[in-house]
Amino acid sequence: MIFSAGGAGIFKSTDSGQTWATVYQTPGGSALTIDPGNHLRLAAVLAKTGAVIRSIDGGQTWTNGGTLCQYCGRPLLADPTGSGALIAGGSISRDWGLTFQPLNAPGPGAPVAIAFDPSHAGWIYVDSGTGTLGHLALSTDFGATWTPKTSPPTSFSAMLGLQVDPDQPNVLVSANPDGFYKSSDGANSWTRQTGPGPFTTFFPETHDPFALVSHKCSATGGMFAIGSATGPTFHIDFSPDYGITWMTPQLSGITSVSTGPGCTAYVTRPAGTSTDAFLAKVSSNGTVQWATYLGGSDNDVPIALAVDAQGNAYVTGNTTSQDFPMTVPLLGVKGQQYGFVTKFSPDGAIAWSALIGGEGANIVSAMAVDSSASVYIAGRTNSAGFPITPGVLSTSIVPGEYTGFLLKLGSDAGLGYSTYLGPANISPTAILVDSNHQVSIAGVGIPPGSVQQSAGIAPFVVKLDPSASSVILSADLSGVAYGGAPSALAMDADGNLLVFGSTPDPPVFATPGAYSSPPVATHCQSYGVRAVAGCGIPGQAQCLGLSAYLCRGGG
């Protein structure tokens, strides 16, 4: 059985979380705990009233217990030894919530972190805090007497969370604003485990709950924690050494984590956190011939779709699903976020599916398919472990910086080539492949092969040879749309490239005879400034005043 407390009440699942039933309905949410010594015994504190409710039959019926002050029931903890003791806020109950008495832990301020020792009934650690300072103490008699302990050696010694190792009672882990701390001597001394690190690594969020695991489940023990991986959404990750190193982050949008019997771990996510890609084939009369989902257990975001001459469909995008369907080995190394390419046959079956990644962020932005059913994808990455092939345009990256990439897959998903587009500051936004298998790439940044090294936000277009080893042409478009971004490429019958995109209003120039915006005087006057000719380009004028816009047209 699994129990969960939410904003509308308390819920119970008897099928490992597949379905849920309401066992107590109340608005405003509640804190909830279960007695490890008797799984039919539950207790909750209603957030708005501070009332304690109790159940001894697995949530089927509830009776009233003691009353605490409003919002004083967090944290709500049950003694893991099964003694029947409960702690709610700064109060303790020895009769499973029927009555409460103050903990009276020493130190200034209210309790900010509390932990039972799973190996000793009645052993309680309490950290009382005021401002940034914490005062840690231990009671071995359910709070009757207290012994001072040592706080972590940090200016933020007031803890955000505290847990005792379930198999080693002298080992404690504390969450503080600057990272996790570990004590191996019963809170007499502390060692910092982790703190702020590079954005491309897992950064634990110490304000959110963490969970220690039994050595029966992991030989070295360890912990689950919530934190940021490749973006602002929170992931769950496991550390085998209490926060020094981390595995691959899983799932996004995690709000809480808890461990249960049988080496299980549970996490909660808001509804709608994950997404799946879908693909549907619709006939000319509007009938859906087939439709399918594509993805795994986390976010799967499609970016582009293409169809070849045989009717095969190609979908590319980005995923954080570690279980995304693959039919070929991973291209690159395991990481937090992958690009994907999946080929569907005309009847909707997966012909092949590939993941492309590295240890950091790998973000696909565009795709093209040539006449031989080879697939080209472009995007950006900060992964040094991206699957780069020898002899290509660029094989190295500035550590920690983002740059563009171009990757070619054969008709069987085999890796044709893969190259960085430069050491840093390149973001592809569109690609096009011609009949000679030459790939044109539009984007923003410093284009490869550029003679004029413009600022990093300038738009560009480049064309590479069929092996992606050299630049055929490179055009810096900063004079056309500085600060803008191309979004599409096309080629006419004469082999001329057409670049389509957006630019800040107004752009720097328009060529003579081409369609342009309203005259300069009208535009500049709309900003309350005046236009002065002579900015060095025939037919151009500059808006002077509080605005620094460049305007088209005469003065």
Image (cartoon, grey):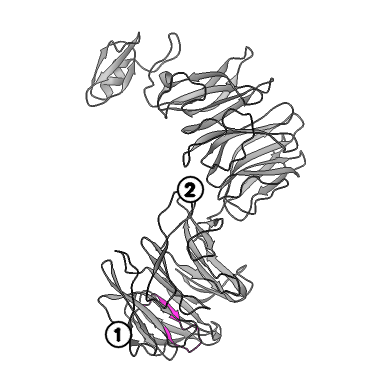
Numbered-mark total:
2
Residue that carries the numbered disc 2 in the rendered image = 200
The answer, for residue 26, to whether it is visible in the render is no
- The answer to which of 427 and 150 lies nearer the viewer is 150
Residue 502, percent from left and from top: 45, 27
Look at the image and give the residue range highlighted in magenta.
73-86
Q: Amino acid at mark 1?
A: Asn
Q: What element does badge 2 sit on?
A: loop
Question: Is residue 74 highlighted in magenta?
Answer: yes
Q: In the figure, is residue 309 to the left or right of 552?
A: right
Looking at the image, residue 44 lies above or below residue 227: below
Q: Image quarter for residue 537? A: top left
Residue that carries the numbered disc 1 in the rendered image = 104
Q: In the figure, is residue 2 to the left or right of 78?
A: right
Residue 368, percent from left and from top: 64, 30
Labelled pair 2, 1 in contact (Cβ < 8 Å): no
Sequence order check: which comes first, mark 2 or mark 1? Answer: 1
Residue 253, percent from left and from top: 50, 57
- The answer to which of 254 and 25 lies nearer the viewer is 254
- Quadrant location, the N terminus: bottom right
Q: Image quarter for residue 154? A: bottom left
Looking at the image, residue 129 lies above or below residue 289: below
Q: Nearer the viewer, mark 2 or mark 1?
A: 2
Q: Amino acid at mark 2?
A: Thr
Looking at the image, residue 492 lies above or below residue 273: above
Which numbered circle lies on residue 510?
Answer: none
Is disc 2 surrounded by few (<14), some (14 to 19) or many (20+) residues within 10 Å?
Answer: some
User: Residue at image x 70%, y 44%?
Assistant: 353
Q: What element does badge 1 sit on?
A: loop
Is disc 1 surrounded by few (<14), some (14 to 19) or many (20+) residues within 10 Å?
Answer: some
The answer, for residue 186, to whether it is visible in the render is yes
